[in-house]
Image (tube, rainbow, N blue to C red):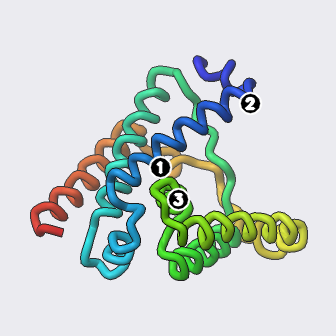
Amino acid sequence: MIFSELHENKKAQLIIGFFIGMAFGSLLFIGGVTKYDVIIGQLLLTDFTVIKIMLTAVVVGMIGVYAMKSKGVVELHPKPGSFGSTVLGGIIFGAGFAVLGYCPGTVAGAVGGGSLDALFGGVFGILIGAGIFAWIYPSIYEKILARGEFKTETIPEALHLNSRIVVIVFLVFILSVLAGLEYFGL
């Protein structure tokens, strides 16, 4: 694997991750999804900029990951999940999103764009929330987080289908949704 050597080098991973994060935040800012009005417009179903950018990212990521996997450049290591951690994470994510109007990705892009509400509400909120989560993690792991564990499978593995078929079906579906949003002027 090309990335095996990089996998062992934590410092290089941090540097690469920093620059990829900067590029990701810049693209979110350029795309306009770090603006409060755009995010609220998505939640009110009047502006679909956020979903268009997310679906485009899914298409690019899906094609890139499976192209690299098919060439043997990377291996996928899906993490195990559970219904307990998914529900709790969804509640925390939704509450933060409803209160502030940003998700963790857009809050970083908004801070880069100079939004003070994202800095004080978002970044400090994320740091405080992460600290609280780390503090209570041992007491909630078995009671909540490990409840309803499920297998570590990719979608093609779970469906027992060739990954190319799944990628093509999802690609057609997502491109159809994007074309529909553009057709209806959303």
Q: Position of residue 100 (x, y in %)?
A: 53, 77
Q: Which residue is tagged 3?
A: 111
Q: Which residue is tagged 1?
A: 25
The quarter of the picture where residue 131 lies is: bottom right
Give the amino acid type for the residue marked by disc 3 in the picture.
Val
Crowd rating for badge 3 (residues with CA inside 10 Å; few <14, some 14–19, many 20+): some
Check the image and report above or below for 116 versus 157.
Answer: below
The number of discs equals 3
Dot 2: element: helix
> Mark 1 or mark 2, which has the lower sequence index?
2
Q: Which residue is tagged 2?
A: 10
Residue drawn 26% across the image and 55% down it: 173
Q: Position of residue 136 (x, y in %)?
A: 86, 71
Give me the C-alpha separation between circle 2 and circle 3: 26 Å
Quarter of the picture containing the N terminus is top right
Residue drawn 33% across the image and 63% down it: 51
Dot 1: element: helix
Camera-side residue: 79 or 108?
Answer: 108
Crowd rating for badge 2 (residues with CA inside 10 Å; few <14, some 14–19, many 20+): few
